Image (cartoon, rainbow, N blue to C red):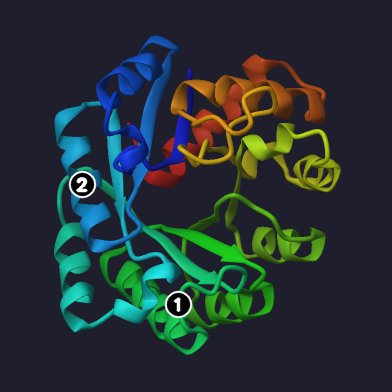
């Protein structure tokens, strides 16, 4: 059994066949799916999916791409959503200095606000950090204590060790299967299995052999196979460890 700890089944890429995608995940033995909010609307939709399917849980939050539109109303909306049943985390939140869809000076206050909310409600956080290692780490350290995961990890070994030292989990996606992803695979090797989570980030980052296609939770096994190969352990060991980690992190029964 596996848990997809980060996907976006509310996104429009799934509008034509969402129910079939979800049933494929169930048929493949995916025990739980965490659908991740990235805006107020996305968080509402994530919560809706969690109510419709018993094995789907939701996180709520505002992605740094949405920072220019962040205001008190949207903060209050996330606060109210976060109190709902089956909402297991605040996220995805963080900093993105790669695409710069929002101004940098707006991303930091949003990030800090979401971290404060997580502490207020005693929820773990799902962190997005892209080409923003120093600022992400600085803000996180200033906000501790927190329980968190760095999703779709793309940092270097120092960034990894800094978050491991804080007690954070680290999550990897199917991009570790890509032929040119040797650096990422080296980071996976450095990550203790007891701190590792699996995610698809669907609809993005479909595994090697399906690149360019839409990713979906059923493909989590292809990711697990790669992790097992890198760590030189069995698929069963990867399943056992990552499922236990996810249940601990998201407080799933």
Q: Position of residue 227 (x, y in %)?
A: 71, 29
Answer left or right for 47 relative to 57: left
- Residue at 37% x, 37% y: name it: 13
The structure residue drawn at horizontal position 28% and vertical position 27%, both measured from the top left corner, is: 18
Give the residue at mark 1: 102
Q: Position of residue 222 (x, y in %)?
A: 63, 21
> Residue at point 54% right, 74% down?
100
Determine the image quadrant of residue 175. top right
The residue most toward the top is 27
Name the residue: 72% across, 60% down: 155
Side of 102 relative to 177 (left or right): left
In the picture of the structure, the residue carrying the numbered disc 2 is: 45
Label 2 close to label 1 by CB (< 8 Å) = no
Helix, strand or loop at mark 2: helix
Mark 2 to mark 1 CA distance (whole Å) = 22 Å
Which structural element holds mark 1?
A: loop
């Amino acid at each position: 059994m596996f848990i997809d700890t980060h996907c976006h089944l509310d996104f429009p890429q799934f509008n034509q066949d969402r129910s079939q995608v979800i049933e494929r995940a169930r048929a493949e033995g995916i025990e739980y799916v965490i659908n991740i909010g990235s805006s107020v609307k996305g968080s509402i939709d994530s919560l809706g999916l969690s109510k419709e399917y018993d094995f789907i849980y939701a996180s709520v939050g505002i992605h740094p791409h949405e920072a220019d539109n962040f205001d008190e109303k949207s903060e209050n909306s996330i606060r109210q959503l976060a109190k709902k049943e089956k909402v297991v985390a605040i996220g995805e939140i963080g900093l993105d200095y790669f695409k710069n869809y929002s101004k940098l000076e707006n991303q930091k206050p949003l990030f800090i606000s979401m971290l404060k909310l997580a502490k207020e409600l005693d929820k773990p956080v799902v962190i997005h950090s892209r080409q923003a290692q120093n600022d992400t780490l600085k803000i996180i350290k200033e906000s501790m204590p927190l329980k968190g995961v760095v999703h779709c990890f793309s940092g270097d070994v120092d960034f990894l060790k800094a978050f491991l030292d804080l007690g954070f989990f680290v999550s990897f996606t199917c991009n570790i299967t890509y032929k040119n992803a040797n650096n990422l695979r080296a980071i996976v090797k450095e990550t203790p299995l007891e701190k590792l989570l699996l995610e698809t980030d669907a609809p993005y980052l479909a595994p090697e052999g399906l690149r360019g296609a839409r990713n979906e939770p059923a493909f989590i096994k292809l990711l697990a196979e790669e992790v097992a190969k890198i760590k030189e352990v069995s698929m069963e060991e990867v399943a056992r460890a990552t499922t236990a980690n996810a249940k601990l992190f998201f407080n799933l029964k």
